[in-house]
Amino acid sequence: MAPNESARSTRDKHTPDATRRSERSRRAIYDAALALVAEVGYPRTTIEGIAARAGVGKQTIYRWWPSKADVVLEAFLDLSEQAAQAAGQEAHALPDTGDLAADLKLVLRATVDELHDPAFEAPSRALAAEGVVNEELGRRFVAKLLEPQLRLYVDRLRSAQAAGDVRADVDPRIALELFVSPLAQRWLQYTGPISYEYTDTLVDYALGGIAPR
Amino acid sequence: MAPNESARSTRDKHTPDATRRSERSRRAIYDAALALVAEVGYPRTTIEGIAARAGVGKQTIYRWWPSKADVVLEAFLDLSEQAAQAAGQEAHALPDTGDLAADLKLVLRATVDELHDPAFEAPSRALAAEGVVNEELGRRFVAKLLEPQLRLYVDRLRSAQAAGDVRADVDPRIALELFVSPLAQRWLQYTGPISYEYTDTLVDYALGGIAPR
Amino acid sequence: MAPNESARSTRDKHTPDATRRSERSRRAIYDAALALVAEVGYPRTTIEGIAARAGVGKQTIYRWWPSKADVVLEAFLDLSEQAAQAAGQEAHALPDTGDLAADLKLVLRATVDELHDPAFEAPSRALAAEGVVNEELGRRFVAKLLEPQLRLYVDRLRSAQAAGDVRADVDPRIALELFVSPLAQRWLQYTGPISYEYTDTLVDYALGGIAPR
Amino acid sequence: MAPNESARSTRDKHTPDATRRSERSRRAIYDAALALVAEVGYPRTTIEGIAARAGVGKQTIYRWWPSKADVVLEAFLDLSEQAAQAAGQEAHALPDTGDLAADLKLVLRATVDELHDPAFEAPSRALAAEGVVNEELGRRFVAKLLEPQLRLYVDRLRSAQAAGDVRADVDPRIALELFVSPLAQRWLQYTGPISYEYTDTLVDYALGGIAPR
DNA sequence: GTCTAAACGAGACGGTACGTCAGGTCTTGAA
DNA sequence: TTCAAGACCTGACGTACCGTCTCGTTTAGAC
């Protein structure tokens, strides 16, 4: 048996040698993918187009990613990581001044701003849409991007529970949805305008309830 | 000049004579579109496929609808209308037993069931996804399907306000999102499981707030 | 049995009542067909186009003619008849001055002129082309248009045989092809230019042969 | 710089790399094109049909040929070349036994046989018909296929002139039409039957003339 | 410092679906 | 019933991408 054969038998041809991967190509593909999604939208973004724009052969994309959705998702994750690093430690925890309502309002206002940022809007909308219809991608999108952010709310709510600002029997994972999901739905489905007043109101309603005290 | 001549002079060739439209074809196209979306999913549903399955020329589709999304949306609206008519007056108002929490829980449990119905899931997911990325379609989807349902919640909450079960200063249109949007997001984005307990909890949290009394 | 059934059984639907046929439409269709063939060529002449130009419904054409070729052939035959009537008796016989060569040259020169007439060229080329590939139409084209003209040559050659200007053992139907067919082929297949000198030469060669005497 | 690079720089994207062309596909397309023309005729032969029959993507045809006519013409030229190679040197010159009449009769009899060969008849009739109505194609058809054959007659007649069997003042290019064109017209237009006697007679008439000596 | 195997750019390949268009058939309403 | 109008079904058009598959050409690790 030739030595290279044994090498091949341990490595399927569908799993190329990652150590020899071209970093240049990877970066160029991320950039091209995000640029195209932003410019022409996700459906009209094609793998051929990404390859052409990145100055890369189509096979280089098909070698490393199984689908267009994966390329765009990974490119977006990369972008988010870079943005997070640029923003410093803020990404690791929500502010905790002791005033829960104020802290939540602050963070949600920042989210409102982010949702209006065109650089994020096009790709994240595209991925969200794909995730609606493609469960596997949707779950990955949530696990990699959404859930880590929601965990910060959970932490902050736990802290509030410890401080007695939130009832102990409340499930934080559900509670956070009271103010996060309405904002998400308005953004995703155009069911209403998004503003600081709106998110402030959400926090107030969620914390105090809508029933009379 | 005959009346129809003036009508014709204002109609260019891109807007065919709707009075001569074939009802048979329209129905067949609706059925085929919904069936295909349910069977192979929205992305793999093609206009060619709809035409073939409906026993209809492609041009007959392109003549009356500008895009695949429009065909499916209209087909889905038609389906919803039929379902509403079959269900009778239930669609016109939420139950109002005087017990707001119980009424909301009941309706949300019904929604949970509906969201698990495969006949509705495939097309509505497809349309929601398309609406995320296609604002025009999204707004139409909301206006025609979502908003009418949300209005029923508004009405019920107004009634509750009159009965003193909800604070008078609360905006019902926002308040309803406290329990509707979380469900919607879990369904759309797979951010969590959907169950009766979950929706019951949402109603409790929303009505009573999460802060201690 | 319903009354209309008996009506149908006595009259096949493919043979409508000719007595009620609109002469106006027939003429308009002939004119439109020839005009279109001349303007855009035979292949791009469509029954739809003829109907639109004639101000006639498509079905009116399909009712009376089985194919585009038939419409054009009939229109062309009609045109030829009219032209023949306008030209008087010249169509019934070739000139017979006693000088066979001169007579033939004269007639062939007239043919050269006719072949250069755009009003005749487009439809006759179109019909000839169709006839090459559609034997049934080709034979009809020949029988109705070509053969009557060739018969005049036969007559003239018979007269020449009687006068001793053509050998008695020569078959006139074949002999005429010596000068007619070369002209036809050059015209049909663009195998060479067409001029008076050319046709004169053909007559000389055909009458005298090309071998030395 | 490698030589092919400079070649590439002068070639835009509309002229693909011919060196990478698939010979298998080219052959399959030729075969399919000729088969379809023979079976259903030229007008009903479609590029889609050729592609399907050849087991080839449509784009592979559009990549290399600008039109259906070009595909079929090229396929037919290829067929002719192969037939010529199979026939050996006969294609390069007419027989020259010294007996002009006998040589011409022999060749014309072979032509008669060829005209009756179904493998040749369908595509050449289709191309001839198209050429009648499409001058550009017609001229190409003549230049590539007809004229090379006629040149052989010109050569043989020149040889006969040198031998004193044809008058020196005769133009061979015209003279050959005396026996070639009648046969062509009968075949193209169904103006008469085609037989050995007929072509023999044509040669006799053409060489000796039809006038008495 | 070679050697060599894999990743690379390029792009041709067999396909699918696109959206447009033309053509023959079928349906409707006016005369 | 004929006719005009035009919607219908069919199917070919030429284009855009798909995902696969070679081609040479880098390129980077092992010898």
Image (spheres, coloured by chain):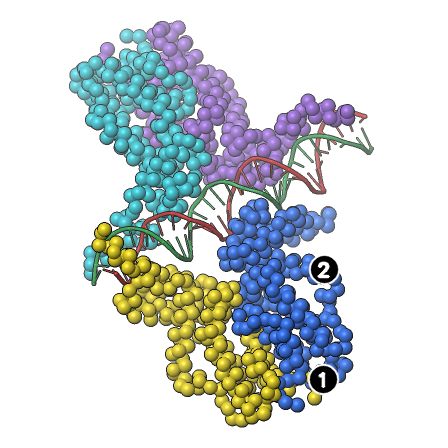
Chain colours: A purple, B cyan, C yellow, D blue, E green, F red
Residue A18, position as x, y percentages in the image: 64, 26
Q: Is any atom of residue C124 visible in this view?
A: no
Read off the chain for label 2: D
Residue A78, position as x, y percentages in the image: 54, 27
Q: Nearer the viewer, mark 2 or mark 1?
A: 2
Question: On screen, D7 above or below C122?
Answer: above
Residue C145, position as x, y percentages in the image: 46, 75
Crowd rating for badge 1 (residues with CA inside 10 Å; few <14, some 14–19, many 20+): some
Q: Nearer the viewer, residue C128 or A129?
A: C128
Question: On screen, A111 above or below D117?
Answer: above
Q: Secondary structure at mark 2?
A: helix
Q: Is any atom of residue C125 visible in this view?
A: yes
Residue behind mark 2: D85
Name the residue furthest left: B162
A183 sits left or right of E16 in the view: left
Can you tell which mark lies on residue D168? Answer: 1
What amino acid type should be assigned to the residue bearing mark 2? Gln
Crowd rating for badge 2 (residues with CA inside 10 Å; few <14, some 14–19, many 20+): few
